[in-house]
Amino acid sequence: MTKTIPLLTTLLLAAVVAGITWQLQSPKSLTLRFYPYMGEQVLVFNDLRYQNPGGPGKFLIRDLQLFISNIHLIGKKQTYRQPDSYHLLRFDNDKGYFDIVLKDVALNEYDRIELGIGVDPDANGSIVFSGDLDPNGRMAWNWQVGYKFLLLEGRLTSNEKSIPLVYHIGFDESYTRVTVPLANDSGFFDQITTLKVDFSKLFMQETPVNMEQVSTVKFDPDNVRLIAQAFPDLLSIN
């Protein structure tokens, strides 16, 4: 009898270890949840509350869309690449955030997330539909130019003037890869990673953008470059 108890204990421990190992290695879902921010506060649409960073007046944001693409999870031994990974982030919904769900992922194998802001050059010049890419949609310019990576529209009020704000940012050279850490809570359950998209970075640069002087950006390469140079700092773990 005294020999049976250690044997049962060993078998139970082996079963527990096997169960934990199976649970850790079994595929999970990872939700990337993107929240729009202006500085330290969640973005509020259609509210004339934001100060022009480089000049007088206040502005509001009415419409905001952003392409995120080519999502990779990277670990020490392997990389996960999401198929058809082109996502058009929109925040004009009751939730106030946008989810991208990666299914069947061995979360414990990865420690960082790499993704693209915008559309990579190959897809930007292609007529092939993939993910949220739609060459007939509002975010498409034409076959020669490709897609708008960022669409931000609103209004600036300055010196009793109302000035439309239109920022359509694209071009291959604006495509930007960024990496953020993946905080793996336990590996036992499906996971939500919350990311902050701070749109104030587009204008609060080393030399703040005067939105009264640069109120419309579409096809001018210098002005597009001015706004897109903030892309590397746009995302962070919230």
Image (cartoon, rainbow, N blue to C red):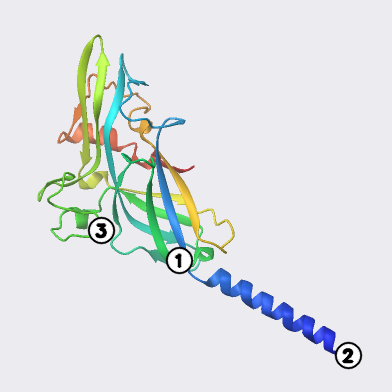
Query: Which residue matches tag 3?
Result: 131
The answer to which of marks 2 and 1 sits earlier in the sequence is 2
Residue at the limit of the structure toward the top, as seen here: 159
- Name the residue: 26% across, 13% down: 158
Q: What residue type is labelled 1?
A: Val
Mark 3: few/some/many CA within 10 Å (<14, 14-19, 20+): few
Where does residue 17 sit, x and y in percent of width and height? 67, 75
Q: Nearer the viewer, mark 3 or mark 2?
A: 2
Identify which residue, 39 or 20, lies in the foreground: 20
Identify which residue, 68 or 204, lies in the foreground: 68
Q: What element carries label 2?
A: loop
Q: What element carries label 1?
A: strand
**Looking at the image, is 149 positioned above or below residue 163?**
below
The quarter of the picture where residue 200 lies is top left
Q: Which amino acid does label 2 sit on?
A: Met
Q: Marks 3/2: CA distance? A: 63 Å
Mark 2: few/some/many CA within 10 Å (<14, 14-19, 20+): few
Q: Marks 2/1: CA distance? A: 45 Å
- Name the residue: 73% across, 77% down: 13
Where does residue 105 sit, x and y in percent of width and height? 45, 66
Query: Which residue matches tag 2?
Result: 1
- Name the residue: 84% across, 84% down: 5
The answer to which of marks 3 and 2 sits earlier in the sequence is 2
Where does residue 231 sit, x and y in percent of width and height? 34, 40
Query: Which residue matches tag 1?
Result: 105
Left or right of 56 on screen, residue 184: right
Q: Which amino acid does label 3 sit on?
A: Gly
The answer to which of marks 3 and 1 sits earlier in the sequence is 1
**Looking at the image, is 198 positioned above or below residue 85?**
above
Q: Marks 3/1: CA distance? A: 19 Å
Q: Is mark 3 on a helix, strand or loop?
A: loop
